């Protein structure tokens, strides 16, 4: 069994739905117009955990639209791992070695961002402190989960 850290983008909800989420131990947040439900789900597989979490959200009247990819900046990596930003900069410049630091996923206005699952995997492989015990989905896994959510949205709409 593994603990999966899942954050879903959800359709907007009201205060009553936020209270229902809280009663189930599910965190809610908002950034701009997007709303999120964060679910820690223990399961045998990622997809089984996604399906279980989606079923739970739907039973609470919350409609997930997609799984959020956990992207991190250098400063977020430093914060999560408890190391200095210069140490993270040194890591991110490591393009050789076994294994090299993951390639950045994209760039934001503040600089490069990485997929946390890739960074966390690298931390574990290189036996560096600060890695998460929880499992964050990779890009491919998020895409697979999003396809499942889209394919099954009609099923939940009638439930």
Image (spheres, rainbow, N blue to C red):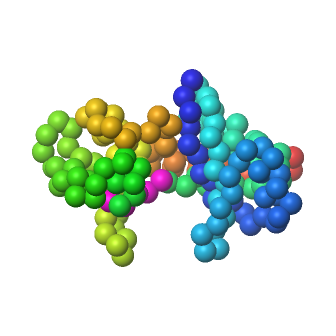
Image coordinates of residue 19 in percent, x first then y, are 82, 55
Q: Is residue 57 left or right of residue 86?
A: right
- Residue lying at 61% horizontally and 74% vertically, measured from the top left: 32
- Can residue 19 be spotted in the picture? yes
Answer whether residue 97 is magenta in the image: no
Image coordinates of residue 158 in percent, x first then y, are 86, 50
Q: Quadrant of residue 93?
A: bottom left
Q: Is residue 137 above or below residue 104?
A: above
Image coordinates of residue 3 in percent, x first then y, are 56, 33
- Residue lying at 25% horizontally and 34% vertically, measured from the top left: 126
Number of numbered discs present?
A: 0
Q: Quadrant of residue 36?
A: bottom right
Q: Is residue 105 above or below residue 53?
A: below
Q: Is residue 126 left or right of residue 153?
A: left
Q: Is residue 29 left or right of residue 13?
A: left
Q: Nearer the viewer, residue 60 or 143?
A: 60
- Can residue 155 be spotted in the picture? no
Q: Quadrant of residue 112?
A: bottom left
- Residue lying at 33% horizontally and 37% vertically, measured from the top left: 129
Q: Is residue 43 above or below residue 91?
A: above
Q: Quadrant of the N terminus?
A: top right
Span highlighted in magenta in the image: 70-74
Q: Is residue 43 left or right of residue 56?
A: left
Answer whether residue 71 is magenta in the image: yes
Image coordinates of residue 18 in percent, x first then y, are 78, 58
- Residue lying at 20% horizontally and 43% vertically, measured from the top left: 100
């Amino acid at each position: 069994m593994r603990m999966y850290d899942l954050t879903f983008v959800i359709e907007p909800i009201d205060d009553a739905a936020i209270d229902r989420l809280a009663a189930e131990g599910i965190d809610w947040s908002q950034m701009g117009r997007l709303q999120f439900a964060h679910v820690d789900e223990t399961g045998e597989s990622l997809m089984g955990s996604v399906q279980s979490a989606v079923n739970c959200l739907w039973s609470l009247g919350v409609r997930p639209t997609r799984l959020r990819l956990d992207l991190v900046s250098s400063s977020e990596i430093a914060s999560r791992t408890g190391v200095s930003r210069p140490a993270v900069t040194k890591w991110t410049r490591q393009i050789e070695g076994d294994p090299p630091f993951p390639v950045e996923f994209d760039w934001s206005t503040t600089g490069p961002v990485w997929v946390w699952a890739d960074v966390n995997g690298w931390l574990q492989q290189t036996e560096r402190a600060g890695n998460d015990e929880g499992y964050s989905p990779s890009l491919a896994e998020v895409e697979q989960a999003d396809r499942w959510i889209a394919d099954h949205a009609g099923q939940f709409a009638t439930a």
